Structure formats: C-alpha cells, structure tokens
Amino acid sequence: SLPSSAQSSQPSENPSSPLPSAFPSKSPSKLPTTSPSSLPSLQPSIVEQIITTAGSLSVNVDICAFDSERLTAFSEAAIDSVKQVTDCTVESPCNAQLANVCGESSALQSSSRMLQTSTFQLDYAITQTFTCEVGSCDSSSDSATLESLIASIVDPLESALSSDEFLNILSVNILNTGRFSANITACLAVWGILREPELEVAPNTLGTFFPDWGGDSETCLQGEAPTYMELDPENWLHDTLEGCCERYYSGWNKNRCINVRGSGLWYVSHLLERCVTDCEEGQGATCGGLANPVSDNLFADPMSCCLAELDWRFVDFCEADSLLINCYEGTGKYYRGDTAGRPVCVRDCDPEVTGDTTCGGLVEDTYIIFHDTAEECCSIEYNWMNNELCAARSDQIQVNKYWPDMTNSKCILDSQTPAEELSIMIYNSTAECCSEGIHWLSETECLTASAL
C-alpha cells in the first residue's frame, strides 16, 4: 500500500522498522513533542555535592595595623597553615581560601553567615566536592561520604587549635615569609572557630529549619517539626539556619543560635578571674564552656574582655593569663614591695623565670602603682627612708658610703655591713660621718672606733 499523505497525530504502535531511518530529516520537526519521553535516558544526571566549612582565626598581634605587604604575608602564612593541618592540597578534593582579612572581603564569595558580623582578623572557607550517588544526595553512601569528608576537615583543625600544633605550624610559616623577625612568634597566641558546614544540595532527610521551642538548645533544628509548625510552614519553617535564627533568636540570642558549638569569642569567667573562649568544653585550654547568651558579653579578643569586665586587673597581665602564655615578662617597672614581702621597691617581673632577684612578681591588679625608677618609687612609696639607701636596696647594689652606728659610737661602711635602718643618714667619708653622726665623741675617738 502507499504511505499516507497526512501526518499521524501520535506515534505508530507498529513502527516500520526498529532501525533508524536511512534518510534522516534535514531539519527539526515543526511539531515537537509536548511531553517527556516515555523512554528516559539510561544515563543518570550528575549531581555534585559541595560542602563549605567556614572558619575564623585571630592572634594576639594587631595584624590589621601591618602594611599591605606584611598583612598579605601573614594572611598567606595563616591559610597555608590551615591547608597543612587539613592536608588540603592541589591533589586533594578540597580547596581552602581566605574570605575576609581585617574586614576586607577577598575574591572568594564566602557564606553570608561568616561575613555579616565577623569579629575575627581572618575568615576562610574550605570547600569539598563529591559526586552524589542519587540526585537528592541522601543515599546511605552519600551520607557516609559526607560525614567522612566533613570529619577530615573539622577533626584535625579542632585538634590543632586545641593544642599547640596549629600555633607551631603558623609560627614556622610566618618566619618563612621572610617579612618578620623572630620576636613576632615569641609570645604569639592563636584562637579560632569552625562553623557548621553548609551544603549545596540539602538532603531530603534533613528537612527545613524550625525553632527548638520544646528544648533548651537555643537554636533552630532540622528534622521533623512539631505538627502545628508543619501546618503553618510560612510562619515556622525556614530553608536556612540564618533565616530561622534571625526570625526567632534575634539580638543577643542570634550568636548562640548560629554557632551551636560556640562563637569562639571571649567572655569573662569571674571564678577564674580571667577571660575564656565561648566554646564547648574540651575545645582547647582557653575554652570556658558555652557562654550564657543573656549574662555573658562577648568580645573579639581577651584584651577587650579584660578592659571591660576585669578593669581592676592589670590589662597586660590579664591578657597573658587569659591566653595562658608564660612568656609575658611584665613591665619591668617598680612598685611597692609589701605585696612581695619586701621592705623596699621591687620590679614587675617574675624572679623564677628571669632569675632576677629584684623582681617581686608580675603585677596582677591595677591598684598597684608603677614607677619608672627605683628612686621615684622610693621617694613616693617610702618617703621616710633615705632615698639613696632605699633605691640601692631595691636595685640590690652596694653603697660605698658610711652610716653612724649610734649604739656602738662608730661609723660603718654600708657596702661591708649594710644598715638595717633605712631612714638613717649616710655620709661620703668616715670623717664626715664622725663629725655629724657621732658628734658626742671627738673625731679622733670616732675614727679610732670606726677603724676597729
């Protein structure tokens, strides 16, 4: 039979041949199909999961005051340290980049949660990518891969920041830049925080975010929301943690809501009389546990915390005590020695560390007044004493002058037998001492007695 001259309205149930036409059409059909094929492609679409783990770092050096070259060198040393700790190299499936340096965003477009109100000197982001087994990225294999990749970043970084490992690596990298002298690392301290990883493809098993009204987590949860929230999703359910926290835990609660494991910022511990970091117990020696969102004010660094919350403590000592660094040497200035059990002035330094016996210990409290010299300290704090004797005893140096021993009616060289009564007059010579200090004897008698 001859072929029909009219177009069919639907595909034939009995096609002429299972083979493709030997004469394919030269142009697309004027009547394309309006529905998907009943025989979809046998090749699944490729879905890649991207994990972004944001982190922040600060040190007890004002790097933001550096010139551009030194700031760049320090920043690169810091991100190189992150890469070393996480083994995030060119060959690995992860990429670590700086996101924010001293409030200036880098080329990396980081998460809004990290950059909105960063109080750290450096922010960075680590991205990891893997191909999902299923399009929703929620198969058991996808979940296992996700957990493994996150752990490969979070575990080593938290461990390194909780110990001296990260500090040691950072110190080496800083010096290797050739832009800094060795003294920059002498008393260096570093602290930081890792935020909850964000996913490009949210697995269906996680669901949307909702406020934890029934618990005490003070954050938004994912999973099965209460029925009344499910029935009113526009008011209760949010696609992002940021949106949920902003809606239900705004103000002083928002920091706690977003940073469930702590913000890494500083707050005062009145029990310890120092500042501690806001983090879960066990996350480093400076960690004081999670801050109370109502009663605990948070600060970017321990010095700011010390100034605001512990104003009766000497700020430099408070900062060193909070950072748990033992290389703080004190000011070296003089203060009244009563608190150190000394009868004269002493210096603000640690005798056990320095081996200097003029040190009276590190000053902790601001009620103690500092003086630049021993003479100044003696004149103000011990004004009834002979200033020269007081200053000499403070500096532990000899005085080659004579003092009158009125009990035994003779003059004594102080460098041989130091006077115990520091309010006594001293003289340049034996003759002067005898004449003015032992005036009831003749000069000959006094000189004779003093020579014995």
Image (cartoon, rainbow, N blue to C red):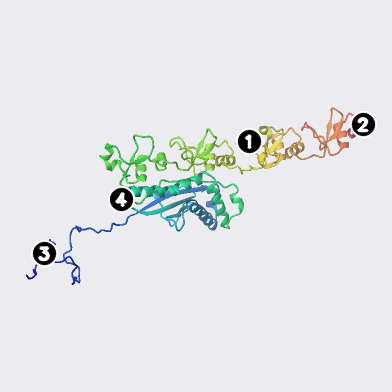
Would you identify the image quadrant in which residue 258 lies? top left
Report the amino acid beneath label 2: Glu
Residue 426 at x, y = what percent? 81, 36
SS for dot 1: loop
- What amino acid type is highlighted by mark number 3? Ser
Q: Position of residue 110 (x, y in %)?
A: 41, 52
Image quarter of residue 386: top right
Q: Position of residue 405 (x, y in %)?
A: 84, 30
| Quarter location, residue 220 | top left
Q: Residues within 10 Å of mark 3 (few under 14, many from 20)?
A: few
Name the residue nearer the viewer: 400 or 160.
160
Quarter the C terminus occupies: top right
Horizontal side of residue 164 vs 91, given as left or right: right
Q: Depth check: give the residue in front, 276 or 96.
A: 96
Identify the residue at image location x=45%, y=47%: 154
Residue that sits furthest to the right in the current view: 444
Q: Quadrant of the N terminus?
A: bottom left
Q: Which residue is mark 2?
A: 445
Q: Which mark is residue 8?
A: 3
Residue at numbered disc 1: 368
First in residue order: circle 2 vs circle 3: 3
4 or 3: tag closer to the N-terminus: 3
Circle 2/circle 3 CB separation < 8 Å: no
Judged from the image, the secondary structure of the residue bearing numbered disc 4 is loop
The answer to whether marks 4 and 3 mark residues whose Cβ atoms lie closer than 8 Å is: no
Residue pushed farthest top?
Answer: 407
Say whether disc 2 or disc 4 marks the residue closer to the N-terminus. 4
Q: CA distance from mark 2 to mark 1?
A: 48 Å
Q: Which mark is residue 163?
A: none
For the residues labelled 4 and 1, the Cα–Cα distance comes to 65 Å
Alpha carbon distance from label 4 to label 3 = 39 Å
State the residue position of label 4. 136
